[in-house]
Amino acid sequence: MTLFRLAPGWAPTLDDMETALDAARFTPCGATQDKSFGWVEPRGQAHGPLVESVDGQRILRFQIETKAVPGALVREKAQEAADHIEATTGRKPGKKETKALREDALLALLPQAFARRSQVWVWIDLEHGWLVTDAGSQGKNDEVLSSLVQCFSGFSAALLNTAMTPQTAMTQWLLAETPDDWPAGLAVERECELKSHDEEKSVVRFTRHHLLNDEVRKHIAEGKLPTRLALSWEGRIGFVMTESMQLKKLSFLEGVFEDRPATEGEDRFDTDVALSTGELRQLMPALIEALGGELSSDPLTAAGQSAAANPGTGTLTQGRAMPATADTADDSPPF
């Protein structure tokens, strides 16, 4: 999960959303096109709605198709063309012509390339002003938001900004003497990554390891700070929080879906969306509170909020840009 705060005042109706997204509906790559993206039906039913509303929550699905040709193959085909030019004219192609030959080679090979598709689920909670995606990379989030900006007049969204950075909070939780020092409802689990910020960029990873111990504290004292930490909330949701406040490996723990209907062949989309978003709508405020509360996007308001959350420090905690990361999200619905 990546959490975004919607700008106030944006509240389109379902019909408005359907009409706007239909103009950006997904179409597969053309013969010489290397990338295509757009909106598809969340339920996977052809010609169905592009926006689903379940218990007041809007669910969308964004699809990306890419075609890639190995660079070595492009260079090989371009070299064949260059060799032919040299053999027939007696001259070697220059840099500009060589570049054009590679572009021509790529266009010639693209129709034979296999297409790969990935999807990003988008959950919009208009009541609380949230937009949530399951994209694992900044690039995919940028494409989703860019498409929404093009589709909707007045749409704007910014990454969640909290008074305390996730890294500062994770450090405090790992330095806690007992679980009683953790925020209410949150528990540190048995996985984390610590990384130094010196020239060596040392990394230490703990997996299936009790983390409230002197070894972890010693690494932190030496300057290695947490970049990932496994957490659970109320024994109902497990996840790994990163320093950019992405929630990875999100999973609903035993008991959360016990009351879900088990009728064979039943479409569980509505039930799954209602149960999962209901749980996540409780997790998100608890997590924000554990991070000192949300900062306003207005600089003057943010300064006052930060000073209140960090008395005596005189330091304003700025908003964080999400770093580019390896794409780890799968294509299964998270909601």
Image (cartoon, grey):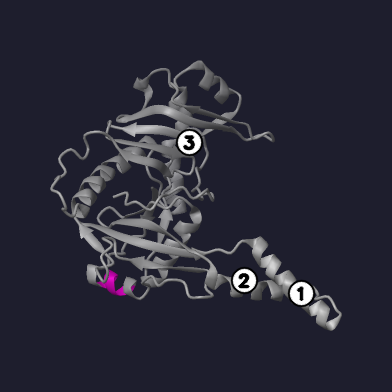
Q: Which disc, if any, is residue 106?
A: 2
Tell me which numbered mark, 2 or 3, is placed earlier along the sequence: 2
> Local crowd at mark 2 within 10 Å, few (<14), some, or many (≥20)?
many
Residue 108 in the image: state x and y as whole percent.
60, 75
Disc number lying in front (2 or 3): 2
Give the structural element (helix, strand or loop) at label 1. Answer: helix
Can residue 164 be seen by looking at this rendering? no
Please give the range of residues in magenta. Answer: 16-20
Residue 211 in the image: state x and y as whole percent.
45, 22
Q: Residue at x 16, y 53 (%)?
A: 265
- Give the main secondary structure of the magenta stretch: helix
Q: Are marks 1 and 3 in contact (CB under 8 Å)?
A: no
In screen coordinates, is 328 left or right of 202? left
Q: Is the residue 295 above or below the residue 224 in the image?
A: below
Q: Residue at x 42, y 56 (%)?
A: 158
Q: Residue at x 60, y 28 (%)?
A: 223
Can residue 89 be seen by looking at this rendering? yes
In screen coordinates, is 85 left or right of 291? right
Of the pair 203 and 327, the residue shown nearer to us: 327
Amino acid type assigned to the residue bearing label 3 in the image: Arg
Amino acid type assigned to the residue bearing label 1 in the image: Ala
Residue 31 in the image: state x and y as whole percent.
50, 75
Q: CA distance from mark 1 to mark 3?
A: 49 Å
Picture quadrant of residue 249? top left
Q: Is residue 188 magenta-colored? A: no
Q: Which disc, if any, is residue 228?
A: 3
Which residue, given by chain and number where applicable, does mark 1 sit on? 82
Q: Is the residue 45 above or below the residue 256 in the image?
A: below
